[in-house]
Amino acid sequence: AKEAGRNNIRVFKSEMNAQVTERLNLQTRLRRAVDQGDFELVYQPQIDLLTGSVVGLEALLRWRLETGEWVPPDAFIPIAEETGLIVPIGEWVLINACQQNYHWQRAGFPAVPVGVNLSARQFSDPELLDRVRRVLSQTGLDGSMLEVELTESAFMHNVEEGINTLNALKELGARLAVDDFGTGYSNLSYLKRFPVDLLKIDQSFVRDITTDPGDAAITQAVISLGHSLNLKVIAEGVETLEQHEFLRKHACDQLQGYYFSPPLLARDVPAVIRQQGWA
Ligand code: C2E
Ligand code: CA
Ligand code: CA
Ligand code: CA
């Protein structure tokens, strides 16, 4: 038994080393990716449930490797957060999302806001507001064409600061969405105090909405909570007609998911919107 225990420790240690090495490796490669700009934004349409037209495009980050492979954000955002690399990456995202949207506004199509995800660290960065102001003025994009997506945990760090930052973003014309709603902080009183426009029901609730009574109940509750506070509610991760039907029956405002469209390359966005008749 003793022998086995020792072996376990050895195995555990070498796994740890492998993990540490892998993390360092990832960190180095991520730093290089920042310098070389090996990122790309893809855009996922958000559809108004009643009119069936596109009302927004969420910008989602991809890291493009030399091999042509794409790394999804969940594989590198946490490390980018820990190392602070999220700040330059986030700035790149903001600039590119606003630039792209400005081009679409100039072209007259699609005339909808762009949703940008901000992580906790970006949101608590004291330079965030200056950054956003600068990007809007440099790109020429109207602030009302920017929607900021934040998780509950991102603005619960420092409530007073958070409120000030959100109010300042609102003054720039931006819309504010609570991302992954219901998965994080449970004290809902912030909803009264924070100038939020939109609740995003997390896909973990939407997934089993038609089979799991608990998920169905939570989703219905979020929709009525949102509406009673005068907020719009959007469901993410909508993949099936059945989910769509459920959400329509319960008066959800907007939908986003593979049922409508995967995230798209920027160059494909106008054509897909036209072909699908979403505008
Ligand atoms: P999120 O903001 O909750 O984004 C929704 C995720 O669900 C996206 O994954 C999207 O591609 C995926 N998705 C869309 N429709 C469906 C569907 O019908 N079914 C399923 N199963 N999934 C669907 P993605 O693009 O891999 O992004 C993962 C997370 O990474 C995002 O979650 C967001 O938290 C973060 N992220 C993405 N881009 C950025 C960024 O530019 N900055 C920051 N800070 N975080 C980002
Ligand atoms: Ca999001
Ligand atoms: Ca989510
Ligand atoms: Ca998320």
Image (cartoon, rainbow, N blue to C red):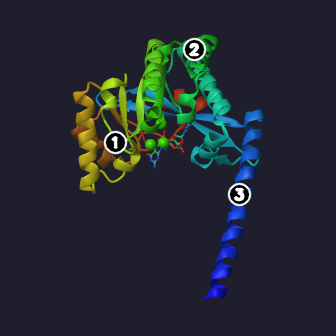
State the residue in front, 152 or 271. Answer: 152
Residue 37 at x, y percent in the picture: 73, 33
The answer to whether any part of residue 119 appears in the image is: no
Residue type, mark 1 in image: Ser
Q: Quadrant of residue 17?
A: bottom right
Callout 2: helix, strand or loop? helix
Closer mark to the observer between disc 3 and disc 2: 3
Image quarter hosting the N terminus: bottom right
Instruction: Say which residue label 1 marks.
Output: 186
Q: Is residue 81 above or below residue 208?
A: above
Task: Tell me which residue sits at (58%, 22%) in the image.
Answer: 128
Q: Which mark is residue 133?
A: 2
**Horizontal placement of 153 versus 215: left or right?**
right
Please determine whether, in this image, residue 161 is positioned above or below residue 276.
above
- Look at label 3 and name its amino acid: Val
Q: Which of these two is toward me, 26 or 65?
A: 26
| Tag 2 and tag 1, C-beta contact below 8 Å | no
Query: Marks 3 and 2: CB-CB under 8 Å?
Result: no
Where in the figure is residue 68, as x and y percent of width and height?
72, 46
Q: Earlier in the sequence, mark 2 or mark 1?
A: 2
Q: Which residue is mark 3?
A: 20
Does ligand 1 reach within 8 Å of label 3's beta carbon?
no
